[in-house]
């Protein structure tokens, strides 16, 4: 299933999950002060990743005849931005919703032929793991 994904995209995609995994682990394993920093760092990184996922759609829209959803391209960044300004529990919930929504928009773009099929195959496990790590963080701070 993952064999048709370009190696650079596969490796960078999974490597990009490391800060989320580290943040979730830090919340469960570190003393309070360090855990608070792990939460802050994790949420900031998740916001950056959401902005990146939205930018994919702007990039596709910029290609002549590429289609894309340029209106969606800014939405994930705004979701991440708002998540940084609210309390951790609703912020984490908002980030989870943002990653789920971003995956759904990506899946629609793959079905429409706007994004390559391999991108959808890559995004499924990456989105699931991102939501899992954010969910573990949510459970830790609830």
Image (tube, rainbow, N blue to C red):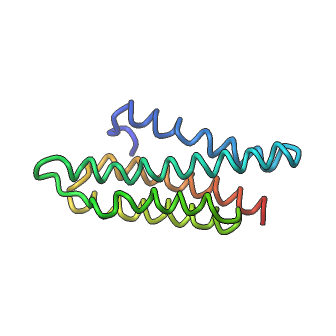
Q: Residue at x 47, y 53 (%)?
A: 50
Q: Is residue 115 left or right of residue 65?
A: right
Q: Quadrant of the C terminus?
A: bottom right
Residue at left 44%, top 65%? 101
Corner quadrant of residue 132: bottom right
The x and y percentages for residue 53 are: 41, 51
The residue depicted at 53 percent of the width and 67 percent of the height is 97
Which residue does the image show at 69% across and 41% down from the upper left? 22
Side of 38 relative to 77 (left or right): right
Which residue ends up furthest to the front in the rendered image? Answer: 85
Residue 9: x and y, percent? 39, 36
Q: Position of residue 11 (x, y in %)?
A: 46, 33
Q: Quadrant of residue 17?
A: top right
Q: Nearer the viewer, residue 45 or 116?
A: 45
Q: How many marks?
A: 0
Residue most extreme to the right: 31
Picture quarter with the N terminus: top left
Residue at the left extreme of this rendering: 65
Q: Position of residue 62 (x, y in %)?
A: 20, 48
Q: Foreground residue, 123 or 102?
A: 102
């Amino acid at each position: 299933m993952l064999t048709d994904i370009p190696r650079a995209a596969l490796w960078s995609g999974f490597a990009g999950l490391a800060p989320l995994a580290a943040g979730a682990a830090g919340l469960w394993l570190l003393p309070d002060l360090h855990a608070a920093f792990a939460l802050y760092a994790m949420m900031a990184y998740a916001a950056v990743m959401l902005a990146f996922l939205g930018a994919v759609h702007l990039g596709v829209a910029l290609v002549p005849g590429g289609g894309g959803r340029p209106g969606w391209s800014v939405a994930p960044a705004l979701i991440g931005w708002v998540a940084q300004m609210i309390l951790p529990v609703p912020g984490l919930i908002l980030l989870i919703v943002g990653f789920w929504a971003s995956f759904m928009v990506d899946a629609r773009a793959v079905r429409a032929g706007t994004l390559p099929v391999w991108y959808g195959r890559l995004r499924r496990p990456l989105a699931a793991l991102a939501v899992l790590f954010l969910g573990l963080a949510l459970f830790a701070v609830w």
